[in-house]
Image (tube, rainbow, N blue to C red):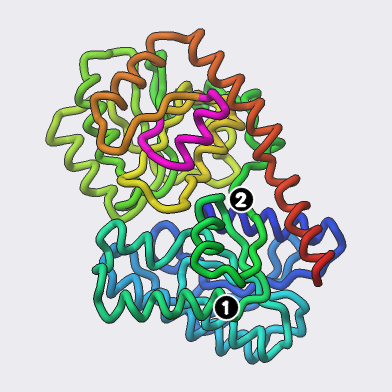
């Protein structure tokens, strides 16, 4: 569950298809509920998932968005994974470490030295820049200065720094010109997400029987800016043909539910987390995909954008920067600036009123996903670079 785990799981699968041996060192499963799943727990666990050896170590999970509990959660896994890796990780040639969380770079560095492996530091979000940008960390505090030093340490100690977006690559190369980067951009399995998977029975069960369904599916967190969806639903409350569904869980879901109830919005429906295997059919069964962000996040491109495009669903997005550029290049929907509730509602209203427009934009999104954002092709390029360099 989650964007980074999906990306990395598909990379693991492709590595194995190409004949490489892969071991995964990760935490006890706890996302998105914020508590360790039933049947797990303790200090260490070894299992096999789809033929891959998975080593799991202890984590203190937390859904709380504040800096201190999030940092403590990150540090708990950083410490446990370092110990578990030192004791149980076999000899490896390349060690790929995910960021965020940024402190995990410490574990990656230590284990790469212990195993004499080449360290690839994979940057999905620029930290601490993003945390400062959204107000989680102060601009010039001791913790922020320490985090920037840790970021520089991770980049300089890595054999390669892999990046999820062009903005991330440009930022790192400008600040650290001697660092070698590899592209590992976001994408989607276009054979998995497909518009032909539309399921009318599933649609009715999850969303009801209104003619038009607009869906957000993903984490209900602070950075997603889902209050914009609730406010847009209020603007469109007179449309009795439109259901706006929010699928998933997260730290702000309870607040969103209360706000929708306070406003008396009967056009908003909150849907529980759905199994990952069901999500392609869920997206294909909607009519419009919603992709809001609270603010511009440097280098961040939501994975749900690619999934919506591959599913042939037109997108209404509240975002600036690279995500808006990708959507515009594909011609797959409408983007407004974050916080533009009137514009967001107007774009949603326009698409809800025009099945022809939805069909046209959906086809364009699907074509762009296949041509430019297919994850199998992305993974192959990344693996090619590893094989040639290593």
Judge by depth and name the residue closer to the eye, 231 or 275. Answer: 231
Q: Which residue is mark 1?
A: 156
- Camera-near label (2 vs 1) is 1
* Residue sitting farthest toward the right: 19
Judge left or right: residue 19 versus residue 86: right
State the SS at label 2.
loop
Q: Specify the segment rendered in magenta.
A: 317-332
Q: Residue at x 45, y 35 (%)?
A: 324
Judge left or right: residue 230 versus residue 180: left
Q: Residue at x 55, y 14 (%)?
A: 359
Number of marks in the rendered image:
2
Q: Are marks 2 and 1 in contact (CB under 8 Å)?
A: no
Does the magenta segment cover residue 327? yes
Does the magenta segment cover residue 158? no
Q: Residue at x 62, y 44 (%)?
A: 187
Rounded to the nearest whole Å, what is the CA distance between mark 2 and mark 1? 21 Å
Q: Earlier in the sequence, mark 2 or mark 1?
A: 1
Q: Which residue is mark 2?
A: 185
Q: In the rendered image, is residue 250 in sight?
A: yes
Judge left or right: residue 132 versus residue 85: left
Within the image, what quadrant is residue 280 found in? top right
Q: Is residue 14 above or below residue 369?
A: below
State the SS at label 1.
helix
């Amino acid at each position: 569950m989650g964007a980074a785990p999906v990306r990395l799981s598909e990379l693991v699968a492709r590595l194995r298809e190409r004949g490489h041996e892969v071991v995964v060192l990760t935490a006890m499963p706890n996302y998105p509920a914020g508590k360790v799943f039933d049947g797990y727990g303790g200090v260490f666990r070894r299992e096999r998932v789809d033929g891959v050896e998975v080593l799991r170590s202890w984590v203190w999970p937390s859904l709380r968005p504040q800096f201190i509990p999030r940092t403590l959660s990150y540090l708990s896994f950083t410490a446990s994974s370092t110990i578990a890796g030192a004791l149980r990780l076999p000899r490896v040639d390349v060690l790929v470490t995910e960021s965020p969380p940024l402190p995990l770079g410490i574990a990656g560095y230590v284990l790469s030295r212990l195993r004499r492996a080449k360290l690839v530091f994979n940057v999905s979000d620029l930290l601490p820049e993003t945390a400062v940008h959204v107000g989680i960390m102060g601009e010039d505090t001791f913790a922020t200065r320490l985090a920037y030093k840790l970021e520089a340490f991770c980049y300089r100690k890595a054999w390669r720094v892999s990046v999820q977006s062009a903005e991330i690559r440009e930022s790192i190369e400008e600040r650290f010109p001697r660092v070698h980067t590899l592209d590992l951009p976001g994408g989607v399995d276009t054979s998995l997400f497909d518009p032909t998977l539309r399921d009318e029975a599933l649609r009715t069960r999850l969303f009801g029987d209104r003619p038009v369904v607009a869906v957000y599916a993903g984490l209900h967190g602070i950075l997603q800016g889902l209050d914009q969806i609730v406010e847009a639903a209020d603007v469109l409350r007179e449309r009795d043909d439109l259901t706006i569904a929010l699928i998933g869980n997260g730290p702000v879901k309870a607040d969103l539910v209360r706000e929708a109830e306070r406003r008396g919005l009967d056009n908003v429906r909150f849907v529980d987390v759905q199994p990952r295997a069901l999500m392609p059919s869920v997206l294909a069964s909607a009519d419009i995909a919603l992709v809001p962000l609270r603010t511009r996040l440097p280098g961040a491109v939501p994975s749900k954008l690619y999934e919506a495009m591959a599913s042939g669903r037109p997108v209404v997005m509240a975002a600036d920067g690279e995500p808006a550029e990708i959507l515009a290049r594909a011609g797959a929907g409408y983007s407004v600036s974050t916080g533009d509730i009137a514009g967001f509602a107007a774009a949603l209203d326009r698409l809800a009123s025009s099945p022809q427009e939805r069909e046209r934009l959906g086809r364009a999104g699907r074509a762009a996903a296949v041509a430019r954002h297919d994850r199998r092709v992305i993974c192959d390029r990344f693996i090619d670079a590893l094989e040639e360099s290593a």
